[in-house]
Amino acid sequence: MITALAFYMFAGVLVASATMVIAARNPVHSVLFLILAFFNAAGLFILMGAEFLAMILVIVYVGAVAVLFLFVVMMLDINFAELRQGFQRYLPIGGLVGLVLLVELMLVLGAWVVAPEAAALRQAPTPDAAAMSNTEALGRLLYTRYAYLFQASGMVLLVAMIGAIVLTLRDRPGTRRQSVAVQVARRAEETLEMRKVALGQGIGEEKGVVTHGTPGLRPAEAAKTATEKAEVR
Amino acid sequence: MSSLINLIPAPLWHLIMIVAGILAIMVPLLVGVAYLTWAERKVLGAMQMRKGPNVVGPFGLFQPFADALKLMTKETIIPAGANRLLFVAAPMLTFALSLIAWAVVPFGEGLVLADINVGMLYLFAISSLGVYGIIIAGWASNSKYPFLGALRSAAQMVSYEVSIGFVIVTVLLCVGSLNLTAIVKAQEGMWFFIPLFPMFIVFFISGLAETNRSPFDIPEGESEIVAGFFVEYSSMAFALFFLGEYANMILMSGMTTILFLGGWLPPIAIAPFTWVPGPIWFILKICVCLFVFLWVRATFPRYRYDQLMRLGWKVFLPFSLAWVVLTAGVLVAFDWVPK
């Protein structure tokens, strides 16, 4: 009884929040409703005993993907009232496209025949639920039985990742990048020059010699040069 | 007493037991949070040769309650341009998330509210949700500084979660289970911080970044963006953020204890140590971790933002990834893989 009640609650909130994702006027609210939908889907997974999938759904989609969605939606300054302006003008053609897709989908689903041996094929790699936890069962399927397919999908993701990096990587001229190794390797002798300054003459205007305000001077060194200058005076 | 038990139907009795368990965790936790704020001020005071709070009560012990009363009686201000609902919901979310994670934490042998199979994943999921409270607060305030703080924080937490994930994978490889009780039991011979010492350090530092603690407290870097994401908050809404941060610190220390410091296990399983009950050991270890949290705050200056990102992505991520591969390789090579 409680399980059925929980199912209807999760399913009801899931459908309602999924509707609100496309109905909400504010895009940030849309993303927040999407997060609510993810949570309820995770709840449904738990009801089915798929605790691993539920947690992964929360970690991957709520913890990472939706954060990035929220990021983008908050940064973009979209005026949705403006976007909705042509709604009535585009309604006939949009509705037509939707209708065509719906009819096509119905035709495909109507003609769909499930292979007679499919149920048996699906049953074979699935171990008994009582024998092992579903984390272990999934691990066995992914990393042992379908290891090559798993690696192949990893490769596809890697290519996508490299593509994203290549698209966004650019070298702007004129920026000063921090090189930690160079900074750590720098020594006082390379950046500092000690001079004895004759009384009342100053250091003179020699070419290329920086007298004071040397950039990158550490406070201790700066203090040292200052006291030395004072001593000279 | 037995007649009383018979009077109440079994499902209701089960519910009552769960509520009692929740209270038994929440009340000491909230007192712990209150005294963590006191301990932080005392420890920082001692490290900076000051006295810290010493006026309210003996040794300033009633200071947290005085602070709480002060915050409760202050006016709640909601900025005119703010999104009211989200503005109020954000601190509640932060605080609630810092509490619900405790449902799966084992305090001793069998002393756990929900002993679920995927406890470690649950903890990881909850800690990765912490960013929402901050990002929603920053956006709902409708103000520049909170928004900048929220964006910084979101980028920071997402970055450090990746290396935390790899550290957790390393530990899980050595345990062979996602159950937190199993993780603690696997450390009966040797606590994991000895064989996995570099991962212990990476986890602790990432934990500092994940909880927005100094030296990674740039989301609220007061020298640049006033107070970051909670500039516009006052009164209890501010207090909830504050409590959430400290509860998260305790949670992160608890995770460190479970993953690396043997949870409720005594240091050596011989007579005088085994007399002390498990929960006491667990709390003591959490206190040690918390002290290091405070010590770090008194010692290190704040990281610059680009350096923080560099540390997360270019140092910790490759390093922890390499350790995952190394650990897996060693486990397979010596046939130590847990069954």
Image (spheres, coloured by chain):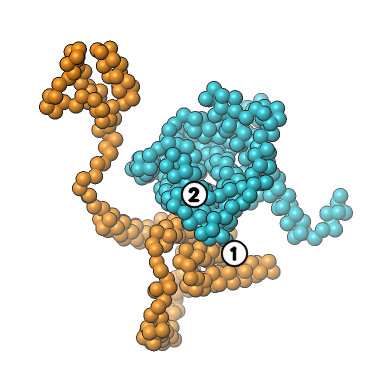
Chain colours: A orange, B cyan
Image coordinates of residue A186 in percent, x first then y, are 25, 28
Task: Give amino acid for label 2.
Answer: Phe
Mark seen at residue A47: 1
Regarding residue B95, the answer to whether it shows in the image is no
Image coordinates of residue A47 in percent, x first then y, are 59, 64
Residue at point 56%, 24% (across, down): B50
Q: In the image, are marks 1 and 2 on the same chain?
A: no
Q: Is residue B317 left or right of residue B74?
A: left
Marks 1 & 2, CB-CB < 8 Å contact: no
Q: Distance of mark 1 from mark 2, alpha carbons?
A: 37 Å
Mark seen at residue B295: none
Residue at point 45%, 66% (across, down): A27
Task: Give amino acid for label 1.
Answer: Leu
Q: Name the residue under label 2.
A: B229
Q: In this view, does A67 lie to the left or right of B94?
A: left
Reply above or below: B97 against A211: below
Image coordinates of residue A35 in percent, x first then y, are 50, 62
Q: Which of B94 and A52 is in front in this view?
A: B94
Reply above or below: B230 against B38: below
Residue at point 27%, 56% (across, down): A168
Q: Of the residues tagged 1 and 2, which is closer to the observer?
A: 2
Residue at point 31%, 56% (across, down): A161
- Outermost residue toward the left? A207
Q: Which of B161 and B68 is in front in this view?
A: B68
> Within 10 Å of the Cα at label 2, are there few (<14), some (14-19), or many (20+) other Cα atoms?
many
Q: Is residue B125 left or right of residue A215?
A: right
> Within 10 Å of the Cα at label 1, are there few (<14), some (14-19), or many (20+) other Cα atoms?
some
> What subunit carries mark 2?
B
